Image (cartoon, coloured by chain):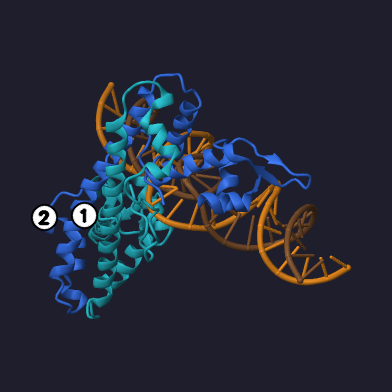
Chain colours: A blue, B cyan, C brown, D orange
Amino acid sequence: MLTIGKLGAATGVKVPTIRYYEQIGLLPEAERSGGNQRLYGPQARERLAFIRHARDLGFSLEAIRELSSLADQPSRPCAAADSIAKRQLQAVRLRIARLQALEQELQRMVVQCRHGTISDCRVIEVLGNHALCAHDHAPEPEVGSSDALPR
Amino acid sequence: MLTIGKLGAATGVKVPTIRYYEQIGLLPEAERSGGNQRLYGPQARERLAFIRHARDLGFSLEAIRELSSLADQPSRPCAAADSIAKRQLQAVRLRIARLQALEQELQRMVVQCRHGTISDCRVIEVLGNHALCAHDHAPEPEVGSSDALPR
DNA sequence: CTTAATCTCTCTAGCAACTAGAGGATCAAG
DNA sequence: CTTGATCCTCTAGTTGCTAGAGAGATTAAG
């Protein structure tokens, strides 16, 4: 049995985050020791590793909630899991495309800066005037429930 | 003079967001009409467009605060503005690289899914076992003050 | 001139996904 | 048996907004 600190060290999840996951019901309530401290077995460890990994891949906690309730029902078809992953893939691709547009724009700004005074700084100038932009870099449209990429 | 609603429509910023910017001191306090409603001139409009554009380019409000205080001092050297933009460019590039790793991994997961049952779903399996991953997709390290990319 | 519709005002509370800190209990090592 | 690390609960803060209540202002139509 692991204490919360060991579990955190083993999975790379911070201690308060583990308690937070329990609080929001993403992890089941842990067993307790005589002195009221949380104790975790290998099952809890696997579950947390699953969550951690999915977080690293950018899944929202909501998506992870779905995924892990699916994981608990091994005989059901996996179409749902598949579609959650596909949605996430789409969201990631969109985000990449958008960030690449930003990258272009920022690079242009930085390259054109003559390092003089603010009054003729290209960075400030471009920010003040969208018309000087080469590309469209509109804000991201919302995509399903797995919009935000974390950390 | 524009009311807050017209200003919002003109700049693409929502009304409560404008009030929020004023509240946190990113916009100066607006003039008021006889009936206590906010009124904006062209200066405020430019400032808000500047903020909006910088937000679209992923700058944090903190970075924007710096940038716009710089913009107010036209005779100072522009090295500071330049370096803020460079930091942002770096952060964006890092984020792109990381998202591309995620994209690879997600795609592998999705492609390998045989559309059977959960018990042999590749998506669930990979999430449960990081060792099945091709790449490292560690969480992003923090970069300066302009970490989060919004919207 | 009145009424109705549409702003606008302030204020509080909520979202994701944590993080930080206070103040106290418990545990393992020496 | 004491010290220091770890654990407990609880509240509040972070970023960048968004939503809603309840009240007042303004405008357009009739």
Q: Position of residue B47 (x, y in %)?
A: 27, 61
Q: Please identify, in this view, whether the residue under mark 1 or under mark 2 is nearer the observer.
A: 1
Between B150 and B16, the one lying in front of the other is B150
Residue B86's label in the rendered image is none
Q: Where is residue A148 in the image (x, y as percent from the top left)?
A: 37, 43
Q: Residue at x 15, y 49 (%)?
A: A136
Q: In this view, does B109 lie to the left or right of C17?
A: left
Q: Do labels 1 and 2 share a chain?
A: yes
Q: Residue at x 30, y 60 (%)?
A: B91
Residue A123, quarter of picture: bottom left
Per the image, the residue denoted by label 2 is A134
Per the image, the residue denoted by label 1 is A102
Quadrant where the image shows the N terminus of chain A: top right
Question: Is disc 2 placed on a helix, strand or loop?
Answer: loop
Question: Is disc 1 placed on a helix, strand or loop?
Answer: helix
Residue B125, quarter of picture: top left
Say which chain tag 2 marks: A
Q: What crowding class fits label 1: few (fewer than 14 Cα within 10 Å), some (14-19), or many (20 or more)?
A: many
Q: In this view, does A7 lie to the left or right of B86?
A: right
**Residue B94 at least partly seen:** yes
| Amino acid on which the number 1 mark rests in the picture | Leu
Between C26 and D12, the one lying in front of the other is C26
Say which chain tag 1 marks: A
Q: Position of residue B7 (x, y in %)?
A: 27, 49
Q: Which of marks 1 and 2 is nearer the N terminus?
A: 1
Between A116 and D3, the one lying in front of the other is D3
